[in-house]
Image (spheres, helix red, strand yellow):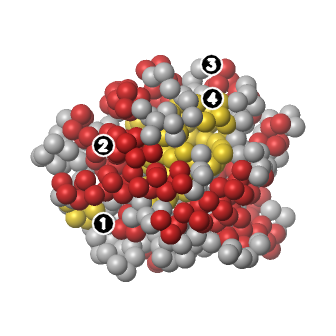
Amino acid sequence: MIFSPLEFPNLTVKNRIFRSSIAGRFDQYDGSGTQARINWETKFARGGVGAIISSFVPVTPRGRILPNFATIHDDNRIPFWRELGERIHEHDCRFILQLSHGGRQRDVGGFEWEKGLSCTDQPDPLNGFECERMTVAQIHETVEQFAQGARRAREAGLDGVELHGSNGYLITQFLSSAINDRQDEYGGSLENRARFLLEIVAAIRRTVGTDFHLQVKISTTENNRSLQPNEPRGNTIEDSVQVARWLEAAGVNAIHVSGGSYFPHPRNPVGDLPVDVFLKTFDTMISSGTRTLYNYLLFRGKLTGKVIRDRWRKAAGKVFEGVNLDDAHAVKRAVGIPVIVTGGFQTASFIRAALEEGKCDGVTIARPLVANNDLVQQFAQGIDRPARPCTYCNRCLVNAVENPMGCYDESRFPSRDAMIQEILTVFEPAEFS
């Protein structure tokens, strides 16, 4: 079942394993792409995944979450994405570009804008990133930016696009009952909160037609109060099932199930909170939000740091692999389009059971593929679980603010030098022209 093709109306993927959205600060400050990003994506295509969902690709520079992430905001970006797509296709792998906008949620702001755009003017409660409440004109402009991003992806010869509507970014901010406090036609009821997303879908379909793959990633259960019990809980699976039905009716070809109303979140990505690494890299973020210095001091305190880590672990729960499967199953029962799901997958028998039981049509994997780029090839060889599996330590994600993306769990390598050497392979070869 893992190696049977997955058929969408406008796309066929050779197996049921997708590389989920993950990458590092591989690109130029202005959002132009580099050879390092091509090398990064090629790792996973060569390793056997059926399709790659790109990392967070901003449709406008103001929507980025970090500098040095390649964008899709201008036609001059098309040649880079075309080159990347062609390199991926050499391995019989498909490439889906994730159209994204951070809204109020970002890690490190650029020098151009002090505030992000959002459905609200309230800073995010986790880090205190400030934002500006979007006017209706700005909403319409952003809708068009998503549509033009899809056009550029199609002109680049890529295989489809994914709208990043999960994990606390701009589309989540509009969808979420815990975040959206608007009093106009874009706030209040679920139908109004979904209006922004549905307008983006409609604009993309008008711009690229109905014969180009379009999927949407949503946080089906937000668990917004996981770390702060006084916060609203956010959208439930029942809310998201209704949104999925609307998306299907609007012409979306697949739903990608995730969780959490902010990122990182105890339920996404599941696993540990490496406080020691956090303290080494968080200095980059201290000036970005009104609560970041306060958070840093909390983590630095011996007692308070332990309290936060314990709270994180409790909120994460004990289920790592397949953490979102129940939600995916609920969505799949409600729609007729394929449903893919993320959540710590790295065991062939577990994935096979999820597919055979009809809980999903495919799985998306990030950290376990960073740990084992050849994970799919191992499955094909009959290996059920890698000899050195991902430990869900989350050191890769905490390091990504400052350092190259890669696996930073030294216990998985014969030495620290071997770990560093593996991380730095993303820079080989060195040139893109």
Say which element carries label 1: strand
Location of the N terminus (image quadrant): top right
Task: Using the numbered discs, state the Cα–Cα distance from disc 4 to disc 3 in whole angstroms.
Answer: 18 Å
Sequence-first tag of 1 and 3: 1
Residue type at mark 4: give it: Glu
Asked whether the beta carbons under mark 1 and mark 4 sit within 8 Å of each other, the answer is no
Circle 3 SS class? loop
Which of the two marks, 1 or 4, is nearer to us in this view? Answer: 4
Q: CA distance from mark 1 to mark 4?
A: 38 Å
The answer for how far apart the CA atoms under marks 1 and 2 are is 21 Å
Number of the label disc, if any, that sits on residue 90: none
Tell me the kind of residue under disc 3. Answer: Glu
Tell me if I can see residue 297 in this picture: no
- Residue 55: which quarter of the image? bottom right
The label shown at residue 116 is 1
Check disc 3: other Cα within 10 Å, few if <14, some if 14-19, many if 20+. few
141 displayed left or right of 340: left
Q: Is residue 284 left or right of residue 170?
A: right
